């Protein structure tokens, strides 16, 4: 996907107003500017920020139900705000990004302030502690590059409920990750192709529960 194709996909897929475009443009600029201080995105993706990061994040939104009032989307290991910031810009979800690293937290808070994102917040700490700040269950849980599958689900399960949708972008070993998840947890699972990386996929899980637990 080229940068022009990425922008056209966004225009087709979302009601992108001038204000929304402005926020996306400013966020992309903040990502590039922030790279002077910390490794927010890979240097090799600098010239492909719309395809490799903005659309790569935005493609998760059509995979979950439209946000109802006050629905919460939790992004684990939020890093530079991918997908959390993009979700906050393009959807009606209330987004809580969980991040441990101090510099990443500061960057996310700066972005939220700069873009005026009243539906976004940052929890600075471990995922396991976040349940005290976000009354479960979340409507959606995402994790772009947070932890191996066996640790990812175990740490975030207290934030989830039966109807929580997990959207988990994975690389070319996505089938192995799904096999691990299904060996440890029961769930309703499907695999969606990635728009931005043909060898990758997005695991979409629902009704995630411990094996032997009640459906």
Image (spheres, grey):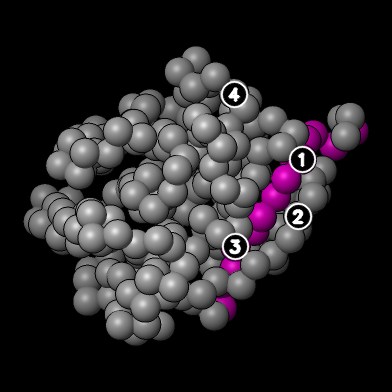
- Whichever of callouts 1 and 2 sits on the residue coming sooner in the sequence is 2
Tag 3–tag 4 contact (CB < 8 Å): no
- Whichever of callouts 2 and 4 sits on the residue coming sooner in the sequence is 4
Helix, strand or loop at label 3? It is strand
Q: Circle 4: is it few (<14), some (14-19), or many (20+) Cα within 10 Å? A: some
Tag 2–tag 4 contact (CB < 8 Å): no
Residue for badge 3 = 202
Helix, strand or loop at label 1? It is strand
In reply to whether residue 206 is colored magenta, the answer given is yes
Tag 1–tag 3 contact (CB < 8 Å): no
- Whichever of callouts 4 and 1 sits on the residue coming sooner in the sequence is 4
Q: In the image, 87: left or right of 23?
A: right
Distance between mark 3 and mark 2 Cα atoms: 10 Å
Distance between mark 2 and mark 4 Cα atoms: 21 Å
Q: Which residue is drawn at 66% across and 55% down?
A: 204
Q: Residue at x 30, y 80 (%)?
A: 3
Q: Residue at x 44, y 28 (%)?
A: 126
Q: Residue at x 33, y 75 (%)?
A: 7
Q: Which of 85 and 32 is in front in this view?
A: 85
Distance between mark 1 and mark 3 Cα atoms: 17 Å
Per the rendering, the mark at residue 189 is 2
Residue for badge 4 = 136
Q: In the image, 97: left or right of 173?
A: left
Which residues are the magenta region? 199-212
Residue for badge 1 = 207
Tag 1–tag 2 contact (CB < 8 Å): no
- Whichever of callouts 1 and 3 sits on the residue coming sooner in the sequence is 3
Distance between mark 4 and mark 1 Cα atoms: 14 Å
Is residue 34 visible in the rendered structure shown here?
yes
Q: Circle 1: is it few (<14), some (14-19), or many (20+) Cα within 10 Å? A: some
């Amino acid at each position: 996907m080229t940068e022009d194709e990425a922008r056209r996909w966004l225009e087709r897929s979302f009601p992108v107003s001038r204000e929304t475009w402005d926020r996306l443009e400013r966020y992309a600029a903040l990502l590039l500017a922030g790279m002077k201080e910390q490794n927010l995105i890979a240097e090799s993706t600098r010239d492909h920020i719309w395809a490799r990061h903005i659309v790569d994040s935005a493609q998760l939104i059509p995979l979950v139900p439209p946000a109802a009032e006050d629905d919460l989307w939790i992004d684990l290991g939020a890093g530079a705000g991918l997908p959390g910031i993009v979700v906050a810009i393009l959807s009606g979800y209330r987004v809580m990004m969980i991040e441990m690293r101090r510099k990443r937290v500061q960057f996310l808070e700066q972005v939220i302030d700069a873009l005026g994102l009243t539906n976004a917040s940052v929890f600075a700490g471990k995922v396991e502690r976040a349940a005290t700040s976000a009354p479960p269950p979340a409507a959606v849980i995402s994790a772009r590059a947070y932890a191996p599958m066996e640790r990812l689900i175990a740490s975030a399960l207290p934030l989830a409920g039966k109807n929580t949708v997990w959207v988990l972008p994975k690389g070319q070993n996505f089938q192995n990750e799904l096999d691990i998840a299904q060996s440890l947890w029961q769930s309703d699972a499907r695999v969606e192709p990635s728009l931005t990386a043909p060898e990758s996929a997005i695991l979409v899980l629902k009704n995630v529960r411990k094996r032997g637990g009640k459906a």
